Image (tube, rainbow, N blue to C red):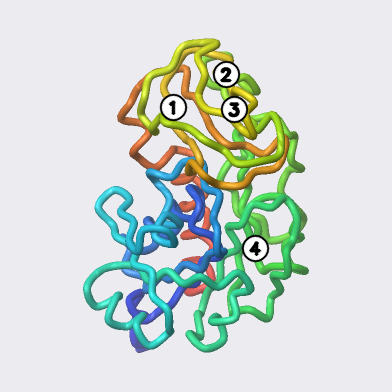
Amino acid sequence: MEKPIRLSHIIVGIRSGGDLGSGVAWRLHRCGFRVFVTETFEPLAVRRKVAFSEAVYDGTARVEGVEAVRVEDRGAAVSIWERGAIPLFVDPEFSLGPRLAPRVMVDAILAKKNLGTTKDHAPLVIALGPGFEAGKDAHFVVETNRGHHLGRVLASGSAEPDTGVPGTVLGVAAERVIRAPATGTWRTSMEIGDGIRRREVVGEVAGVPVPAAIDGVIRGLIRSGIQVSQGLKIGDIDPRGIREHCFSISEKALAVAGGVLEAILSTLSA
């Protein structure tokens, strides 16, 4: 009789601690996997209250009871796992991957294109969203587009192409996204969870005011003082106005995380 596989012996590396990558990390951590996250030097997560990437700036970040801790070398990972937390490394190229020897690597960058992920990064490589071909760039691709196929695991082919239009909430789509009107430094005194009214100024970029297009609650907002480019997504307004939603993982992130979990477990049982 084969010895059962202990999930706590399986290391999973996740590229990006944005809200979707954090949803995946959170779910896999809760299932017992040893998860680590890699990030860039200056993450631009919008939904910062549910993003482990905030540990890059603050040293730690907590999402729904799970903590990520920024560490500088791979030797610290074991002690972080033993205290029940997730180690996070500033490692844009995923160069620590081979040294930590993950059995699974998840590309959660969501750049809409492949930024260098290959099937050689780990025995099992899973990519989220468009820009990857299952079987070629990664072993599996998980659909990230809202709709009937959200969270589906693809063993061949690609996820649906990026439409450039966010999912509709209460009949509102593009208007709920806040974008930079110019290139420059983003400044704001507002916080995630604040209520906002249409035409109220959220902040400014290079002196250009950024007004809200709808009423609602600020669900996401990048850090003040960050350099941004014109057109970059810098905020998200939820027209439902439920403040608590700003601080919990979205149904989209959990659906995608479920797809990643399915891909891993189906491979282990094969």
* Other-residue count near label 4 (Cα within 10 Å), few / some / many at <14 / 14–19 / ≥20: many
Q: CA distance from mark 3 to mark 4?
A: 30 Å
The disc at residue 218 is 1
Which residue is nearer to you in this view: 134 or 268?
Answer: 134
Quick check: marks 1 and 3 in contact, CB under 8 Å? no
Amino acid type, residue under disc 1 in the picture: Ile
* Mark sitting earlier along the chain (3/2): 3
**Callout 2 secondary element:** strand
Judged from this view, the residue extending furthest toward the left is 83
Q: Is residue 23 left or right of residue 206?
A: left
Q: Nearer the viewer, mark 4 or mark 1?
A: 1
Amino acid type, residue under disc 3 in the picture: Val
* Other-residue count near label 2 (Cα within 10 Å), few / some / many at <14 / 14–19 / ≥20: some
* Mark sitting earlier along the chain (4/2): 4
Q: Which residue is at a point 34% across and 87% down the rendered structure image?
A: 3
Quick check: marks 2 and 1 in contact, CB under 8 Å? no
Give the residue at mark 3: 177
* Mark sitting earlier along the chain (4/1): 4
The disc at residue 178 is none
Q: Which residue is at a point 34% across and 83% down the rendered structure image?
A: 76
Quick check: marks 4 and 1 in contact, CB under 8 Å? no
Q: Is residue 133 left or right of residue 52?
A: right
**Callout 1 secondary element:** strand
Give the residue at mark 2: 211
Q: Is residue 249 above or below residue 53?
A: above
Which residue is nearer to you in this view: 240 or 1?
Answer: 240
Q: Which residue is at a point 60% across and 41% down the rendered structure image?
A: 185
Task: State the image coordinates of residue 133 (x, y, percent, origin top left).
Answer: 76, 60
Task: State the image coordinates of residue 117 (x, y, percent, origin top left).
Answer: 69, 70
**Callout 4 secondary element:** strand
The disc at residue 140 is 4
